[in-house]
Image: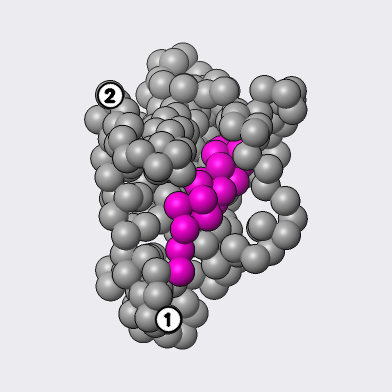
């Protein structure tokens, strides 16, 4: 963390009482550590690259979740499904993060809403019908649309590479439910939480992917498009 000296007359931009201790990119000014802890992701939209936000996400205690309240429990995600569909699950995480970063103002609740609407849509496809469930929330609707386009692109690339339509709706549904459950598990309860988004970004960083002006790329490679 960068340490710096502030003038004795400086005050926190949020509480206007205590001395500021750190620069806050979310408010574009200096704030005290108390306000950073209490207003983070509540009244302040924190950028994902804020080191204080990242540190908070690494150390925060998430609320305990009753397994019986996990969404879409009738969809059984076995270890075998996860192992066999790892490329699709990875692609879904990439699409979620990319959609969020291209939809300004997105927070975790928007992603959870988009995931739920996508799951409802793919459930109807599994039943032999086609009904597109769209969220009323404009941000979630935009995420939904980007994700749908991403899955169509994924299907197209598979057809070009294998010559057959190798991706079933049930497989996409399973990947969506996998990440929906991860989103629920990483919900810290803050109104503007981006804890799940931070998890997605760390997962892609661990896989060696980064986002630059030319698109997503692996270490030492030119920009790429997954899969």
Question: In the rendered picture of this protein, how many numbered marks are placed on residues?
Answer: 2
Left or right: where 107 falls relative to 187? left
Residue 19, visible in the rendered structure: no
Q: Is residue 227 magenta?
A: no
Judged from the image, the secondary structure of the residue bearing numbered disc 1 is: helix
Measured in 3D between alpha carbons, the distance from the residue under mark 2 to the one under mark 1, in whole angstroms, is 37 Å
Q: Quadrant of residue 59?
A: top right
Looking at the image, is 25 positioned above or below residue 146? Answer: above
Which is nearer the eye, 3 or 197? 197
Residue 192 in the image: state x and y as whole percent. Answer: 44, 28
Crowd around label 1: few <14 · some 14–19 · many ≥20 (10 Å): few
Q: Quadrant of residue 210?
A: bottom left
Q: Which residue is mark 2?
A: 136
Residue 194 in the image: state x and y as whole percent. Answer: 48, 37
Name the residue rendered at 54%, 72% in the picture.
Answer: 208
Residue 146 in the image: state x and y as whole percent. Answer: 29, 49
Q: Is residue 170 magenta?
A: yes
Q: Which residue is mark 1?
A: 162
Q: Which residues are magenta?
A: 166-184
Residue 208, visible in the rendered structure: yes
């Amino acid at each position: 963390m960068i340490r710096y000296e502030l003038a004795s007359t400086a005050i926190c931009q949020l509480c206007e009482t205590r001395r500021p201790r750190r620069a806050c990119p979310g408010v574009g000014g200096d704030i005290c550590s108390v306000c950073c802890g209490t207003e983070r992701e509540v009244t302040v939209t924190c950028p994902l690259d804020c080191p204080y936000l990242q540190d908070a996400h690494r150390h925060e205690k998430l609320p305990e979740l009753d397994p019986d309240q996990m969404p879409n429990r009738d969809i059984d995600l076995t270890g075998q499904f996860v192992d066999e569909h790892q490329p699709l699950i990875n692609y879904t995480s990439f699409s979620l993060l990319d959609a969020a970063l291209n939809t300004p103002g997105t927070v975790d609740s928007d992603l959870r809403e988009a995931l739920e609407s996508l799951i409802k849509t793919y459930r109807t496809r599994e039943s032999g019908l086609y009904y597109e469930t769209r969220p009323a929330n404009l941000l979630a609707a935009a995420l939904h649309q980007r994700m749908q386009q991403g899955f169509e692109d994924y299907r197209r690339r598979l057809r070009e590479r294998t010559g057959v339509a190798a991706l079933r709706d049930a497989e996409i549904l399973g990947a969506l439910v996998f990440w929906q459950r991860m989103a629920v598990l990483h919900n810290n309860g803050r109104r503007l939480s981006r804890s799940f988004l931070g998890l997605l970004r760390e997962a892609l960083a661990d896989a060696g992917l980064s986002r630059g002006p030319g698109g997503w790329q692996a270490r030492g490679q030119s920009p790429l498009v997954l899969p």
